[in-house]
Image (spheres, rainbow, N blue to C red):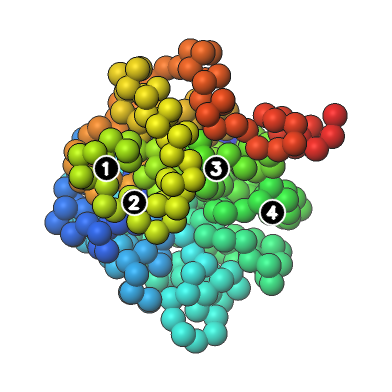
Amino acid sequence: MEYTNLGRSGLSVSRLVLGTMNFGPETSEEDSRTIMDRAHEHGINFFDTANVYGRTKGEGITEQIIGRWFASGDGRRERTVLATKLYGSMGDWPNENRLSALNIRRAAEGSLRRLQTDYLDLYQMHHIERSTPFDEIWEAFSVLRQQGKVLYFGSSNFAGWHLAQAQESALRRHMLGLVSEQSLYNLFSRWVELEVLPAARHYGLGVIPWSPLHGGLLGGILRKQRENDAARSAGGPAAAALAERRDTIEAYEKLAADLGEDPANLALAWLLHQDGVTGPIIGPRTLAQLDNSLRSVEIKFDEKTLATLDELFPAPGPNGAQPAPEAYAW
């Protein structure tokens, strides 16, 4: 496994991030524990979760599964860089969601209890809060840090403008501020290249892409359909996107086959080659999926392959692959 610093921080994290959203709803607790143990065997030390994962409001089922795994000992907690999130609703009463100082305190205490730990390595805002000023947010976060309950803070689903707002507010308070941003980013969805990536690089934030396979469309979906193994990836929005972009996906899977690589690993490796990306979140439901993903760290691209991928999945913006502000003006 390769490691890198999380943004401008001194925190060393694996270049693949273990996503745990399936733990509970899709993957049994026994299988989840086996996957986490195998992740450590592979050297994956960066685990991502959220207080709302588990589908049952207020229960934090996924955090509970991880907490019981930590409680089984053998240095599991000490070897893990633990990231969780707050924002989503954990109850039906006011102040049980979003980013008020009250909910930040309650949400942090709840996550610590469920995860059976006394500190969080990375605490992430799951979404921008438009009705709470950053001065209030940073004051509440600073209390958590002073208490030793949180070491670093991050964001998720922020626009570039939000990153600038958050960081400038933190700087005024002489705080480190954010060290990471978790965004939707993959070959199909490259919009973060316009504003989010440039802002993150400017402020020294590591970018953590979620949905790196775009709901399974970049994971060899056509091959799986031929093998009758794509039921989970071919429904809902993925089915509509597949119908719309079938020619592109066929060309992509052919490119992967010509290179002798799994399409999923090709998509992960492409993200690992993007400037500012710390590591994509992988969400394996089986040990085989986890084991297979390790190959992505080893894949190297030549200029021809990168150019082909750009042709298949063009960069967004009126001026092509230019970041802001060049994307809008010369």
Count of numbered marks:
4
Q: CA distance from mark 1 to mark 4?
A: 40 Å
Within the image, what quadrant is residue 166 found in?
bottom right
Question: In the displayed structure, would residue 153 be above or below residue 312?
Answer: below
Crowdedness near tag 3: few (<14), some (14–19) or many (≥20) residues, C-alpha within 10 Å: some
Disc 1 is placed on an element classified as helix
Residue 67: image x %, image y %?
Answer: 27, 60
Q: Residue 87 vs residue 51: left or right?
A: right
Crowdedness near tag 2: few (<14), some (14–19) or many (≥20) residues, C-alpha within 10 Å: many
Seen at 30% across and 19% down, the residue is 260
Question: In the displayed structure, would residue 150 be above or below residue 271?
Answer: below
Tag in front: 3 or 2: 2
Q: Which residue bears the numbered disc 3?
A: 189
Within the image, what quadrant is residue 117 found in?
bottom left
Q: Amino acid at mark 2?
A: Ala
Tag in front: 4 or 2: 2
Q: Which residue bears the numbered disc 2?
A: 234
Seen at 48% across and 12% down, the residue is 302
Q: Which residue bears the numbered disc 4?
A: 162
Q: Which residue bears the numbered disc 1?
A: 225
